Amino acid sequence: MEMTGLFFYLVSVLIAGGIYAVLCLALNVQWGMGGLFNAGIAGFFAVGAYASAIVTTAASDKHLGGFGLPIPLGLIAAMILAGVTGWIVAKICVRLKSDYLAMASVGIAEILRLVIVNEAWLTNGSLGISGVPRPFADLVQGRSADLVYLAVVWFCVLCVYILCQRLYVSPWGRTLRAIRDNEDSARAAGKDVDWFRVQTFVIGCAIMGLAGGLSAHYFKFLSPSATEPLLVTFLVWVMLMAGGSGNNRGAIIGALAIWFIWSATEILTSRLPPEWITRSSYIRMLLVGLLLQFVLQKFRSGLMPEKSPKIRSD
Amino acid sequence: MIDFINLYLVPGLAIGSVYALGAVGISMIFGILRFAHFAHGDLMTIGGYGVLTAVWFIPAHPLLLLPFGIALAIVSALAVDQFFYKPLRKLPTIYTVIASFGVALIFRSLAQLFWSSGNQVFISGVRMPVVLFDTFRISELHMQVISLTIIIAVALHYFLTRSKLGRAMRAVSDEPELAAVAGLDTERVVRWTWVIGASLAAIAGVFAGMDTSMHPNLGWNLLLAMFAAAVLGGIGKPMGAIAGGFIIGIAEETVTYTWFSDEAFISPSYKSAVAFFIMVALLLFRPQGLFKGRLL
């Protein structure tokens, strides 16, 4: 019994790890390939989660829709909506130093949070959306449904990975790296730097929306607290930095490694006396902050450093 | 009209003071160190808690105990610069932005660890507003906050224009290579930037905490408005940042006034979106800010 409990705990860790891996791949497109700083990951994640939930739930008078459409359509809607949100932000900020994009992305995440909390007709406010369907729900019941969902999540990770890898080795990806490493020379070579950056940002945001949709279908319930802005954004940054920015495989490895550490410390601290449990979560946050500093200073290339593909001349 | 002044304009000036003092630091750090300091809000929180702790031990008015908060904020800022920002100074500044993002988390979790995550007040009990000329009802705190901010702004102006150190700071902000060639000690300028930025952040943190209550997210929630104020005033223009802070503060409060109908023009729950939209409009049409700051 103990063993099956542990097994399903591992499954849940891997599902969440897979969702983080998708986020991490998305950030890798924006930061690793394009050198764009996105500090509002949680915002795009939330847009995706709410979009997919609203499109797929059964009709409800508590929030907009419930359109009851199939889940793949929900995920596509999540990607489109998050992408459009990202496009607006990118359009305004790409001309300027990357710090401005960072400020604006924090801002848009905050605005999205306000909208989600305040617009009850749209999102049912702080009460949240319940009854978000899971794919293949009528096929398997009970705990083994988690196993099916694990497969769904990691299938998405695989698709996103293949997509990102294709992007990376393509001429498009090469242009991005040129822009990231030397903007002026890329511009001199006739590349439309701003347009490439907008594309990069939008693709990254769309993938973040997909991750949001996946998490909504996993938890079956969605409330504003599910998209805790700080934790999501921070963890993803630490994951990418530790895994190796610029390397898609590194992004997945980093997401899994940091998520395992995060979950393992949760098990450890849950055995502490109750008055220490709340405090220990702050200690964990503190350690994540320190880990980020360590990685930035001593370990910048990460577990799997970026390896640019060889340039073929044919 | 009297209601407008009492309930919208004066609170707008008070919250504007908080933004102004925070934005000065952000603007100076952006101008001199060339990065957007994401931990500035949480530096305010740390300063606020410094004074809160002093209040527990010393029975005096919180504003008289400001030096404790200022000292704590300065020590924190200098330590963070030494250990976390300085090693990254040779890299593109975006790495320092990421580091400051992490520092914001470190500051906040320290605040939660040492001072608990709940709301705490500096002075308990209800304070009655002061009535002036039988019409204006203004809280004592708001008067203190606004007048102290104006005094600080004037002092800062004289410091930046008259003192040798202040002029060195402006020189480094305007033209770093030229300043280095002219033999200015850049590291000293950087140190003093942190000292001034952290002091003003601590004061702003105490003001904000006294106006509502102290909690670990206090500073982070103000960060966006302070960025907007710094951009509005023009990066590297401390006086512009002060003007920007007041403008953002007044704009945030007065948009909720019943301008065109009996209902609030913009619902108070969207107050904090105002700063963002001002910032977006600026970045679109006038990214150098109102006072011709640097466009980095």
Image (spheres, rainbow, N blue to C red):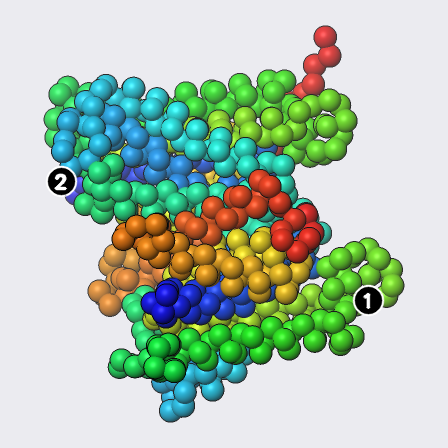
Category of crowding for the residue at label 2, using alpha-carbon neighbours closer than 10 angstroms: few (below 14), some (14–19), many (at least 20): few
Residue under numbered circle 2: A1
Chain of the residue displaying label 1: B
Please provide percent x and percent y for residue B152. 58, 76
Q: Residue at x 42, y 66 (%)?
A: B9
Residue occupying image coordinates x 40% and y 78%: B141
Residue B93 rendering spot, x and y as whole percentages? 65, 49
For the residues carrying marks 1 and 2, which lies nearer the camera in this image? Answer: 1
Vertical arrangement, residue A181 with respect to residue A272, above or below? above
Identify residue type, mark 2.
Met
Q: Please name whichever residue, A225 or A231, is drawn nearer the observer in this view of the structure.
A: A225
Quadrant in the picture for residue B108:
bottom left
**Relative to residue B258, is residue A103 drawn left or right?**
right
Q: Is residue A24 above or below residue A284?
A: above
In the image, residue B294 above or below residue A122: below
SS class, disc 1: loop
- Residue A247 at least partly seen: no
Percent position of residue A28, x then y:
52, 34
Residue B164 or residue A305, whichever sits in front: B164
Question: In the image, what residue occupies the spot 76% across and 30% down?
Answer: A185
How many marks can you see?
Answer: 2
Q: Is residue A52 visible?
A: yes
* Residue pointed to by mark 1: B184
Q: Residues within 10 Å of mark 1 (few under 14, many from 20)?
A: some
**Cβ–Cβ below 8 Å for labels 1 and 2?**
no
Q: Residue furthest bottom?
A: B59
